[in-house]
Amino acid sequence: MDLVTALARARTPEKPGPDTPAGSAVRPWPGPVFPLPEARPGELDLGRLLRLSLAASNGAGRLRPAPSAGALHPVDARLVVGTGCPLPPGRYGYDPLGHRVHRLGPAPDGTPPGATVELSVTAQRTLSHYGHRAWPLILLDTGHAAAALWLAARSLGVPPTALDFDGLAEDPLAALHFAPSETAHRVADAPTPHDLSTRRSARPPLRGTPPQEALRAVLAAAAEASPGELAWCAAVGEPQPALVESAPDGTLRRLAAGEARPTLAAWAAGQAWIADAGAVLLGYGCPTEAEAPQIRRVHLRAGFAVHVAHVTAGRHGLAGRPVGAWQQADLGAALGAAPGRDWIVHGLALGTTHSEKGTS
């Protein structure tokens, strides 16, 4: 995939063509099927890790914990399992609908204890609806899936020992390794299993300006989850519409005065409801001249960061909905800087209230 060309085209106002079939909701893994056994003391609890991160909560697969553009869920997970797991060592494909695995073959020589979750994609699922806009969304979705795994592991007290967003092969796009532990304890600031099992993308409208304390926490969480890759700000409405960012002392400072949300709604594929959102978190960067490895890494990290920020928002009582499709969204140029330097990569709409129609 030529990511440079794909991203340049996705940033234009060109609209995708008619929908095509998305295909199966789950990759048709070969090999015998196995349930995920309960972990014994000292083993990595793969069942709970995957249940809290990637498993569907209904048979249709539309309510997986990791958000996905159009609820199409292109991300597939393959497990490379070593010793110290309830499954025998080997390579497995994960079925998020049945919460089970297919054995694909033996583990490679030198596989460390624990398990590596490799994230790849079935691109046709997203291409079927978004066409030429699909690849940035696919990368964001993969970042969300990686964050779901990372947060689940922290909640279970087994933080990943490696997180790889720097590979160059199309398969996998990202990988996380988890080691077994004799003494698993939830990290003090980690979300609880309940936080993770109840997270959802709220349906619009999302209204109500978030309290400053909550907005500071969301901005800080996004920045911490994407060190050096993106800048972050938030468009807020009443009582003083503005773009705000985190100051070095942790307070909020004004980046620009004025109402930005209607422009953001136009840039976000014309999603008019964004103009009324209480706030919109924005991650920006990835200049026009970025080469494929940077495009890939920045979009993976952006999805990861927005997922962490979304869970943080929920823990502060805010409703949130990720916003991944951005066209002509040159935030830097809109603020008077050189064009082509600071494009919006990902966003998160926030509010203190949301639609009573449910969540997706």
Image (spheres, rainbow, N blue to C red):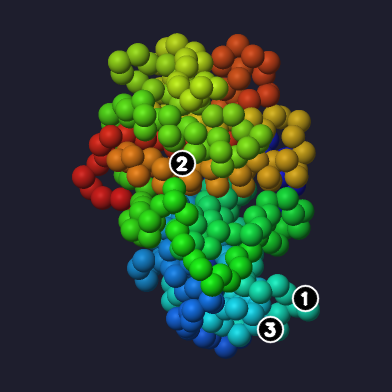
Q: In which quarter of the image is residue 55?
A: bottom left
Residue 342, placed above or below residue 323: above
Q: Name the residue under label 2.
A: 309
Asked if disc 2 and disc 1 are in contact, CB closer than 8 Å, the reply is: no
Q: Which residue is painted at 64% across and 59% down in the image?
A: 161
Q: Which residue is painted at 21% across and 45% down in the image?
A: 356
Q: Mark 1 points at which residue?
A: 110
Q: Is 44 left, or right, of 294 in this rendering?
A: left
Residue 217 position, x and y percent, is: 43, 34
Q: Is 315 left, or right, of 32 in this rendering?
A: left
How far separated are the C-alphas under marks 3 and 2? 37 Å
Which mark is drawn over residue 105? 3
Q: Is 73 left, or right, of 89 in this rendering?
A: left
Residue 209 position, x and y percent, is: 31, 26
Mark 1 neighbour class, 10 Å CA radius: few under 14, some 14 to 19, many 20 or more: few
SS of the residue under disc 2: helix
SS of the residue under disc 3: strand
Residue 205, placed above or below residue 167: above
Q: Mark yes or no: residue 124 visible.
A: no
Q: Is 192 left, or right, of 332 in this rendering?
A: left
For badge 3, the amino acid type reads Gly
Residue 355, placed above or below residue 125: above
| Sequence-first disc among 2 and 1 | 1
| Sequence-first disc among 3 and 1 | 3
For badge 1, the amino acid type reads Gly
Residue 201, placed above or below residue 268: below
| Sequence-first disc among 3 and 2 | 3
Judging depth in this view, the residue of 279 and 121 nearest the camera is 279
Residue at the far left: name it: 356
- Disc number lying in front (3 or 1): 1
Q: Which residue is painted at 55% across and 47% down in the image?
A: 304
